[in-house]
Image (spheres, coloured by chain):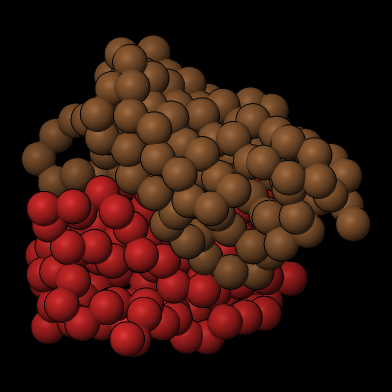
Chain colours: A brown, B red
Amino acid sequence: TQLLEQSPQFLSIQEGENLTVYCNSSSVFSSLQWYRQEPGEGPVLLVTVVTGGEVKKLKRLTFQFGDARKDSSLHITAAQPGDTGLYLCAGPKTGGYQKVTFGTGTKLQVIP
Amino acid sequence: DTGVSQDPRHKITKRGQNVTFRCDPISEHNRLYWYRQTLGQGPEFLTYFQNEAQLEKSRLLSDRFSAERPKGSFSTLEIQRTEQGDSAMYLCASSLPPRGYEQYFGPGTRLTVT
C-alpha cells in the first residue's frame, strides 16, 4: 500500500514566519503533486515534481522532491494570511490508469 | 476556461433518503474521479471513470453508492438510504493523460445527513 504521511498535521504561525511541511512515504513515486485547499472548496493543484532532487519555486513557495522519490517538502517563506489552508501532497499509484493517493494533510493557519 | 463544476454545493437530507450529485468535468478531460473527504483529512478515492467506463470502485464503497457517466461527459453519484456516516464533502475531479495524475477538482458537494 502506497501511503503518504504528512507532518505536521496542524501548524499555526504568525504572518511573516517561515515554515516547512513534509510528505513522506516508504514507497517510490514517479511524481508527487502538492495541492492547497481552502475551507469549503476543492483542492487546487500547485505543482508537480517529477525528478529526484528537483526543486520548484512558486513565488514564496519552494517544493522539493527527495533524491529517492519517496518524500517531498514544501517551504513557505514569509507566510501570509492568504496561505492559510489545507496542504495536501499526492502521487500516482503504480498501475495502469494513474489512480492517485493523497496524503493525510497539513492544516496551516497564518495569523495576521 | 471552464473548470470542474458540481451541483448542488450543499445538500441536507434526512437519514434514509436518496441523494444524487452531479459533476461536470473539464470538457476535454476523459478521466473523472469521485472522492469523499471528511474534515481536515485528505480525499478518499471512491470511483473512477475513463470516458463512460467505470474502471474501479473502492472497496470502501457500499452497495448504496452508485455512479454513472453515461456519455463520457458529466457524471452522477447517487447515495441510497443515506446514513449519518455519509455526511462528508463529495469531490469530483477530472484529468487528462498523459498527466492524468494531475487532478482538477470541483468545489465539492457538502452532504449533511440528519
Q: Residue at x 73, y 45 (%)?
A: A78
Q: Is residue B8 visible?
A: yes
- Is B55 displayed left or right of B32 in the figure? left
- x, y percentage for residue A49? 32, 38
Q: Quadrant of the C terminus of chain A?
A: bottom right
**Compared with residue A21, is residue A27 higher up or lower down, i.e. above or below?**
above
The residue that appears at 40% across and 40% down in the rendered structure is: A56
Q: Is residue A20 shown above or below B73? A: above
Q: Quadrant of residue B16?
A: bottom right
Residues A70 and A18: in front is A18
Q: Nearer the viewer, residue A28 or A50?
A: A50
Q: Residue at x 37, y 53 (%)?
A: B46
Q: State whether residue B15 appears in this view.
A: no
The number of numbered badges drawn on the structure is 0
Q: Closest to the observer: B4 or B61?
A: B4
The reply, left or right, for residue B76 in relation to residue A73 is left
In percent of the image, x 54 and y 35: which residue is there?
A74
The percent position of residue A2, horizontal first and vertical second, equals: 34, 24
Q: Nearer the viewer, residue B68 or A30?
A: A30
Coordinates of residue A92 in the picture (x, y in percent) = 27, 38
Please state if A111 lies on the left or on the right of B81 as rendered. Answer: right
Q: Position of residue B45 (x, y in %)?
A: 38, 49
Q: Give the position of the N terminus of chain A as an image quadrant.
A: top left
